[in-house]
Image (cartoon, rainbow, N blue to C red):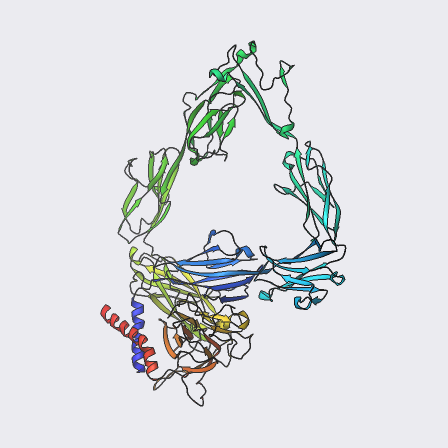
Amino acid sequence: MELFWILLFSVFHRYVQTQGVYAPANAQIVHSGQTCVVKEDNISERIYTIREGDTLVLQCLVKGHPRPQVRWTKTAGSASDKFQETSIFNETLRIPNIQRVQGGRYYCKAENGVGVAAIKSIRVDVQYLDKPVLTVHQTVGDVRGNYYQEKTVFLRCTVNSNPPARFIWKRGNKPIEQSKDNGVDIYEPLYTQGETKVLKLKNLRPQDFANYTCQVSVRNVCDIPDSSVTFRLTNTTTPPALKLSVNETYVVDPGQDVTLSCEVTAGFPTPRVTWSRYPGSLPQRSVIQGGSLTLQSVTPADAGVYNCTAVNNVGNPARRTANLIVRTMKNLTFQITPDSNKDSESIQMGRDLKLSCHVDAQPQDMVNYTWYKNGALIYPTDSLIVLRSDPDLSVFVPPVLSVPVGGGVVNVSEGGTAELVCLVDGKPRPPVLWSRANKDLPMPSGDWVVETRDGRLRLTNVTRDMMGAYRCQTAPYNGLNIKRRQGQVQLNVEYPPVVDPVLLDVRSQTLSTVNLRCLVLKSNPNRIASARWYRNGMPIRTPPVDPQSVPQLRFKLDTTNNGTYECRLSNGVGTSTCTFIVSAQPYNAEFYYDTPNPIRTLKNNYSYILQWTQKEPDAVDKIIGYWINVQQNRQTVLSKQTTTKEPVKGVLMSYTLMDLRIPLSYEVSLTPITSYGTGNTVTRTIQYSEPYTYPRPSDHVCGFEDIRICGFTQDRRDVFDWTRQNHLTQNPKRSVNTGPDTDRSGTKEGYYMYIETSRPRQDGDRARLLSPLYNVTAARGPTGTTRTPYCVSFYYHMNGKHMGTLNVLTRVKSIATVDSAVWSLSGHQGPEWRKADAEIYPSGPFQVVFEGIRGNGFEGDIAIDDVSVTKGKCKQKESVDKTAVLSGTHQSLHLLPVIVQLLCTIFLTFLLR
């Protein structure tokens, strides 16, 4: 029987070697930075809990061939108000000093062009606890007429935290218990921000005047210590009151020094006074001293609403506001409107005429306008001045706007300077406003409208994006108030050709025909004036190029004409170049990253199976071998050429490196060789490392007390993950009647690993937990194969009416990974922890796999604890029960899928041959 399995494995090994190894991307998110715990909630969502200010490090472990590309994205969480669109292309996501707004769901997307992309997600929950804020509010009400007064005091304590905080009120150093003091009420108010707890002191008593402390705690989650705030309540406690030294509206001249003072008239404890401004912040030149704010040499930019606030955490803050207005006058405009009743654009004798003057000023309602004619004061009427017989009005002429001859189109080279001109005449002559004819485009300066006094628009460092039509029109102010005149100028920006490809690596077989084409994507002007070909910088004689055709060069590749080819295209404005690197040099090999781990062969040596595929082997000459170079600490330990069969795209090749020293690492270089020469060299580093120090094939036991879970990892190919948990971290909403309350030793602080079978888990979903890799050597005796036994010992907890199956498998590392079942148990086993042992006989480096399979309901949480893998046979027990090694029909049925799969593999192998 053992000989049959060896033959079956060798056939399967050969099948894997001869078939393509393209594999779709697979991904898994693990953490390696600071963290509190990684757990799953009641719907089996992975949650990464971290303290605010710590460093978040998430790694996306990817698998597949070719090597997948990784992209990180994030969607908003409860503490974030927008979607983060920025993508991070890196397998490791690192966020130092993480803040609460950076919590949310992070996605790792891995894709390599084979199959669909792999997407994994994890929710990051940032834990924090701010210092609480304690405020005091007092109410006074008449009760039973005027017989007596009742004074009630509310102490309100508010804090922001994650997770929700627990509040403890203290009077002095003694906690306040509502059940033991009829004079207090403790409650949570509705409609408050953050978490709030109110201590109500009813009908103040002498003993109520004391020190009150509000202590908040998140129960040491993420090692966050408790926080507290203390307030001293006395019979003199009063809210703040303020008095402002200036009027609410304060008008000053530019350049004047201004002092605003807030005097505290009441309040105990002594209020703290602060100043703010709206809009914006306080000016940089402002000086705050006590309750006074001084602004030196004010400017119009200093205008705004200044707020003085006094706070002593008693009652509501006291506020006073001063609206500071700095006198300004700008944008003085003068308009002349002909007789609007006659619909005229000219000024005529005997007609009405409207002269209007306006200035933008602060304050606007305090502007005084005075009219003069020829220096003499005019006394205005209510709305206008009527001038019927003034001979000087004949000098006013309506404006005329025109584009000069030849100025309708302005040509300029990219990077140059252009001047667009619209001539304007008239008395008074109005300014000219420039804008883009396409209303959706702004001017090059970023403004939508640009004003010029003489009608000339000057553009510097012109780019092709500026090309288009520009509109010029007369301004409606500083001239006659009539219909606008307008014109249009076309800006034409000339630039060199845009070509494709800019740089292309062309590799071909010797004596094959190479065709190089240089495609013009766009150009201004469109006509190509010249096209010339060069090889290694020297011109090549070619027939003249038709300006309307695509420049191309055809030749037969041989050992004399490899090199760099250039096609230089010019359109009279500039020259662009298509560059081709032409050779018969082979492409680089691609290392296969799913190769087995290094295997110990002797006491101090190990071997490594180097595996790779060849990129585009059919594009160049036949590859006759590979040059392998191995270095250790920059010293060459192996340099040789290995022969190989002609590579096929996507087919795996291998070479075994022997006699490598433990625990040294080596840099391996691989270079393909053809009759033309050597190709590009690729390198990778290999290293031998012992498995995690605990557990290992010894007497150590893993109780999963460390967050590193003894080097165990989640299988990236399963449906969901195992979760580390103890009684204190259990979800309070978890399913009852299933799962353990304590670890195997019976302590609530002890941890264990379990599978959560609540929603969204479905019947048959699998979770696999992998042990570290154990490097062992199979010993072969003279009369056959003998293997060293190992004992896998563990405790399991399978309590629940929907209990599924717990399997233990061994995963042996070789050319192909093979999982073998060694132990299995299904169904409800009671509320106790039970011990199980399983003997295994691995043929090489191996891992132990704990596989939990969800049953037909949510009451099926499976747990394991105290796992050990020891060298030697398991100790004999007094009795053998159903927790022992698979036996009889159960074992045969469990192995049936594995046998069927391997038989199918043999059948397919012979068919393909």
User: Residue 73's spot in the image, x, y percent?
Assistant: 46, 55
User: Residue 401's spot in the image, x, y percent?
Assistant: 46, 20
Q: Which image quadrant: the N terminus?
A: bottom left
Q: Quadrant of residue 383?
A: top right
Q: Which image quadrant: the C terminus?
A: bottom left
From the viewer's perspective, is residue 383 above or below residue 684? Answer: above
- Compared across the picture, whether 556 is left or right of 566 comes to left
Q: Is residue 913 visible?
A: no
Q: Is residue 237 visible?
A: yes
- The front one of 870 and 337 is 337
Q: Quadrant of residue 263?
A: top right
User: Residue 543's spot in the image, x, y percent?
Assistant: 27, 38
User: Residue 706's spot in the image, x, y percent?
Assistant: 53, 72
From the viewer's perspective, is residue 557 above or below residue 253? Answer: below
Q: Quadrant of residue 408?
A: top left
- The front one of 8 and 542 is 8
- The front one of 587 and 219 is 219
